[in-house]
Amino acid sequence: MDHQNSIAPEIFRPQTNAVPRKSWRSFLIGRPLSSADAPNETIGKLVGLAVFASDALSSTAYATQEILVILAAAGSAAFGFAFPISMAIVLLITVVVISYEQTIHAYPNGGGAYIVALENLGRIPAQIAGAALLTGYILTVSVSISSGVAQIISAVPILFEWRVEIALALVVLIIIINLRGVRESGIAFAIPAYLFLGVMFLTIGAGLVRVLSGTLGTVTNPPEIYTSYKVVQLVTPFLLLHAFSSGTSALTGIEAIANGVTAFKEPSSRNAGIVLIWMGGILAVLFLGITFLARSTGAVPSEAETVISQITRTIYNGEGPLYLVVVAMTSIILVLAANTAFAGFPRLAAILAQDGFLPRQLTYLGSRLVYSKGIVALGVMAGLLIILFEASVTRLIPLYAIGVFLSFTLSQVGMARRWWKIGHMSSGQDIVTEKSSVLHRDKNFLFKLSINGIGAVCTGIVTLVFGVTNFISGAWIVIVLVPLLVVGFSAIQRHYQGLARQLSLDHYHSLHQVNRYRVIVPISGVHQGSLAGLHFARSISSDVTAVYVSMDPEEAKKIQSKWSVYGDGVRLLVLESPYRLLLEPILEYIEALCKNRQSNEVIMVVVPQFVSRRWWTGVLHNQTAFMLRLGLLSRPGVIIIEVPYQVE
Amino acid sequence: MDHQNSIAPEIFRPQTNAVPRKSWRSFLIGRPLSSADAPNETIGKLVGLAVFASDALSSTAYATQEILVILAAAGSAAFGFAFPISMAIVLLITVVVISYEQTIHAYPNGGGAYIVALENLGRIPAQIAGAALLTGYILTVSVSISSGVAQIISAVPILFEWRVEIALALVVLIIIINLRGVRESGIAFAIPAYLFLGVMFLTIGAGLVRVLSGTLGTVTNPPEIYTSYKVVQLVTPFLLLHAFSSGTSALTGIEAIANGVTAFKEPSSRNAGIVLIWMGGILAVLFLGITFLARSTGAVPSEAETVISQITRTIYNGEGPLYLVVVAMTSIILVLAANTAFAGFPRLAAILAQDGFLPRQLTYLGSRLVYSKGIVALGVMAGLLIILFEASVTRLIPLYAIGVFLSFTLSQVGMARRWWKIGHMSSGQDIVTEKSSVLHRDKNFLFKLSINGIGAVCTGIVTLVFGVTNFISGAWIVIVLVPLLVVGFSAIQRHYQGLARQLSLDHYHSLHQVNRYRVIVPISGVHQGSLAGLHFARSISSDVTAVYVSMDPEEAKKIQSKWSVYGDGVRLLVLESPYRLLLEPILEYIEALCKNRQSNEVIMVVVPQFVSRRWWTGVLHNQTAFMLRLGLLSRPGVIIIEVPYQVE
């Protein structure tokens, strides 16, 4: 062998280029994309807004109502506090958006709260942020699909029986569209998202015009007021805080862009940052506009009719076509909010997997250049939640916001810590961190530190309020789940690190030269299959032993006499098995051989394996070969040789 | 190598004798029994009667009532026909018992209707008989457990919600007791069976004494009469035939002994034959006695109270302790009837499997020398039926008797055919059939032929009546299932026969001498695991090619430079995979090699296989080795070498 020559690696290009075959998969999700297509699979700012903002914008459909539901406990006079509270929430939105905008530029490879926490707070806070975000995404899918289905059901009540099936069908549909690639799913979902924005702006604009012109009346036939408190409350600071924390549901979804920076066209962080600011602006305008109009029209929180519906029919003087469009688009945007999670979860999971906290299959790009396994995993888990909670929004909602706010808090604290570090840097010296983030001196660090500090305190308080007020009704599940996930992350990381250590070549020394092969051929009878195995065994070693497990002395005698004809002089060992066990005698025998093994000796077991073309014939055989393999795999120093014997 | 010496087979007796380990299994079903213990595991006549007669004797609990239910349609005056009809049924019992007694002696290895049909009627009738019997046994378990549970529920109605769970628990209990071995299960179930017989004889005896002494009154507060007809009928021959066929439910269970001859102590066919005649006698006496007393006491068919209960409380002047014992024992014998099926089904399945009609695993004796797999299979299928039919006797009963009577008919026809053959033998010349049955000339062949002929006609008519009257309510399931089973039997047999042909050494010629080995080592990276595989590959051949699938050119370059250090001069082939497929490029490459393969060349693929001690770590890896194995197994001429690499 010519070493010089053979060391130069050949590159084999199969004629077919290993293109996946046409199948139902390519029919469903489209032709496979080559890795070279990756840059074409990113999205621009307009599509990006639709993909990543759906979740946040959909929250305007219920955030105002959530505030009013709490205030209603103190009588309708307390509704006057709704607008000031909304202003405070918009302030919080501003803080969080600025913070994430800075995060996007600081960490251009995405990851949001997880990366910020990892670099600035340490491994455990990062894992907590990751776990909180992942559960948040899963819940986003369950909640938003369930609320979309709830809207469908309020229109067609006969479908109530099938709500779980409808919700699951929607999950499957969104999975398939997302598997087709980020560009295609973005385009598919951009149209309804922009329609929603269009009609909402139109409605709010029309409402403001009518307020200014003094022609806007109040809600006719208002529905019965609903409050989540059972007894009448006074307007206490606690009540206002509760209303504030309920209204912060408007913030859910803001974090998605920071996790999905890599989905954007280059310059990706610039584009993602711009989209984030757009989204923040739109969110603030919609939210304030709706709250203001709710006050003007005297809309009330109710279980029978949403606040949006009351405002809209007042503005448009009844339930005309424009009213119907608004209601329909609101339903659709609720379902689309799930799509944002499908854009965020797989990317975050891939980042976590890259760091060794999740199975590394999550980092592989599927045939359409998306993280297919993450998409499917998200869909499956959200589907399970839907089944478990019977697609009930009321039962799912208490689990929802706490994870998101936990990650907000960690991200704010992390950014604050980062400004602190920057403030204490010696000037003129940039620091590049492990995740290629660059720290460089900034005069305004104290101002930025205080923004993030205030944000951290606010989101932290909201997290606590959420946790306490919803503990019994479901938040405890998340509070239990997040630590469990953190433990899981650590266990997975330990496994990968241990494996890497064991596979490492740092202390590699050449293995012993092997010069003795002991080959064992377990046979079930004397036939073509076992003789094929024997034939192969003899061609690689002269030290071959055939082994037969005997349960019936008569049968053993027959085998022995047949062996003397066909066995070609090879030793046949009969293992008696008085208790009719098949595997155990062979495994015991091999164990005995292993004990007396020389260091230059390798034990090989030839397992003749029947392979049938017809799948159902599997149940007609003992699967001894399969069981033997399983029994032998865990034994060091034993090599398993499978000689497949294809039948029919 | 010394051929003379090595050909003498060694017998290896491991010190531990390959005794199965103590585990939860041995705790549940007892210590394993050695094959040498087999003769101790047979049962005597007394235990045999309890095991095999429970099913038949339990039918006396409802057969009389089944007759009255039909007759009631023509008014209570028609009840007078019940006793004559019972006499006719006892005649039929006599014919069937005589026939089976002859079968047992003619076919001492068991198998009943199946063997009789196989030897005398051909393969298809035999398969039909086998299929009918197997479904009959499964239904026996479902029906008798369900009816036992129904009795429990009528005592404790609060358990109704849990009826399916209770039934399944009873099935599991009977499975476990049967897995403990035929002797243990026999003894466990003999006591309640004999208690049932004892109290029934006592009750009937007491009743007859009171009839003769003229002190037996009539049923006080008789329950409401129930009939299965919706409109009043005249006493037509059809009505009487219907009543007759309903009463033949007394015959179900008679066939069990003929299938289970091998369970008896030697001389097994003599013992089995004696038990069969005992059983027939007891069955006839109980059945006639109950029907007679039903007439004497004026008991009526009802859904509210069984006929047995009415008779018993009349004989004992109220619901005293003896009454309660009779009712309790009747419930228990109904559950025990299931046990008879557990004695019959596994043996019949083993006989069918021996002939290649069912998976051959059914012929293996488990650790307690019973056909464990047949026992578990019966339990699982009966359990599924119980779940499917929600443990409802009413819904299960229409499926029940048709299979049993179909097999009776085939067995009678088969025996008739046998007498016909015997009648046409040349004298003095015995014929030994394939199944070691001996035909020898018999002067009375015409008499015996006519007995079986009449039996065949009667059981045939009953089968037809059953099929027609219950077709819609469930018999169609059996009528569809039996042919499907027959098709299945044939498919299984074809598979085994094809396999035997392919494995046969009849046309065996020595294989080509192999003298070139081409070894392929797919690697996922350069690490201890892949180098261990490489090391082994090099030790068996000098023609080794390492193969790496590249999805990322950067990564491939790293691998190549690492390989130049550790690859020890072995050729490295880089397969580019632009569509990020992992297996397909390797499989395509191997396919290309196979095409150009010389006849003296073997292609070996070394699959380094990670083995982790912790089961859950499986999800953290790609399972490429597993998928590669699957892909390669079906390729002729490729040998798979697994080099396990144990981690942590």
Image: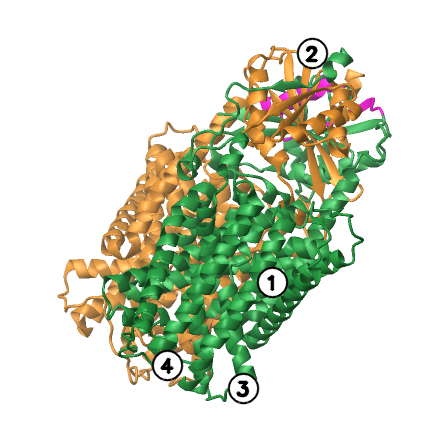
Chain colours: A green, B orange
Between the C-alphas of marks 1 and 4, the distance is 33 Å
The image shows residue A332, relative to residue A269, as above or below, that is below
Tell me, for residue B312, which label it has, or none: none
Circles 3 and 2 in contact, beta carbons < 8 Å: no
Between the C-alphas of marks 3 and 2, the distance is 92 Å
Relative image position of residue B314 (x, y in whole percent) = 35, 82
Residue position marked by numbered label 2 in the rendering: B515
Label 3 in the same subunit as label 2: no
SS of the residue at dot 4?
loop
Relative image position of residue A443 (x, y in whole percent) = 71, 57
- Was residue A425 drawn as part of the magenta stretch in this picture? no
Label 1 in the same subunit as label 4: yes
Label 2 in the same subunit as label 4: no
Between the C-alphas of marks 4 and 3, the distance is 20 Å
Label 4 chain ID: A
SS of the residue at dot 3?
loop
Between the C-alphas of marks 3 and 1, the distance is 27 Å
Label 2 chain ID: B
Q: Which of marks 4 and 3 is in front?
A: 3
Residue position marked by numbered label 3 in the rendering: A236
Q: Tell me which amino acid carries mark 4.
A: Ile
Magenta segment:
A513-541
Density class for disc 1 (Cα within 10 Å; few <14, some 14-19, many ≥20) is many
